[in-house]
Image (tube, helix red, strand yellow):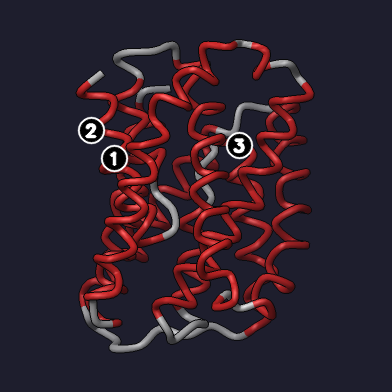
Amino acid sequence: MVAVFSAVAVAYVIFGIAGFGTALIASPILANFMPVSHIVPLLALLDMFAALSHIAKDGRHADTSELKRLVPFMVIGSVIGVAILLKTRPDFLLLALAVFVIGYALYALSGFRARQSFAASAAKPFGLIGGVFSALFGSGGFIYALYLSGRIEQKEKFRVTQSTLIGLSTLTRVVFFTISGVYMNTAIWTMALILAPAMIFGVFLGRHITLRLTREQFMRVIHMVVLCSGVFLLIRYFNL
């Protein structure tokens, strides 16, 4: 329990800073102590409540215009992702995404260009791709982060907008798990209640770390988490 509690706390420090990345940190640790089938619905619950806490406290800082651009395509992408999952094994897509993400993150961290920016129309491919990979692998948050990092200047607005997107994405998963009866298992709810203090502490600490970072430091953290996400996906591909 010490290992599980610590992993969840660290994961939500990252979430408090970046607005995503909990599965990257927590899943490998949790897999050693609980059934893998419990991990995704457990983290979906915790992510949803963590995102709601962000929205309740700082929701007024979210960029609603970016949400309006991304959310419809995120939903469409999720439907496409489910269809792909039902029709085929999406192994190649996982490899392609991992290579793209690692390459982009290394490029961003290199400092070759001081500023990355995207046109508003880029919300369509980023929303679609993020939705597809959220449905396929539960790993779409960093796709939205890449887009928002090139659209939003203020780090606080970025963080809250990203958290809101993750909240909407996890809400969809929670509804699906509820309909399918996954949450009839009381062990998941019990573990969620036990780990709630770790989630709250992590989000609180992450938020306060963010307030002390400059935009340049903040974006470097974002790209580091994106890089780790890509490496995690690559490892996952070779372990399939």
Residue at screen point 57% across, 44% down: 48
In front: 34, or 228?
34
Q: Is residue 141 above or below residue 125?
A: above
Q: Nearer the viewer, mark 1 or mark 3?
A: 1
Q: Amino acid at mark 2?
A: Ser
Between circles 2 and 3, the one closer to the viewer is 2
Q: Which quadrant holds residue 121?
A: bottom right
Q: Residues within 10 Å of mark 2 (few under 14, many from 20)?
A: some
Tell me the tag on residue 136: 3
- Helix, strand, or loop for circle 2? helix
As drawn, 175 above or below 37: below
Residue 224 percent location from the top left of the image: 26, 60
Q: Residue 47 placed where, x, y %?
A: 51, 43
- Residue type at mark 3: give it: Leu
Q: Is residue 152 left or right of residue 174?
A: left
Tell me where residue 213 appears, x and y as whole percent: 23, 76
Q: Position of residue 160 (x, y in %)?
A: 50, 68
Label 1–label 2 contact, CB within 8 A: yes
Q: Amino acid at mark 1?
A: Ala
Residue in the picture at 22% in, 75% down: 212
- Residue under label 1, please give it: 9
Q: Quadrant of the C terminus?
A: top left
Task: Name the residue nearer the viewer: 186 or 173.
Answer: 186
In front here: 55 or 220?
Answer: 55
Asked if residue 100 shows in the view, the reply is yes
Residue of label 2 = 6
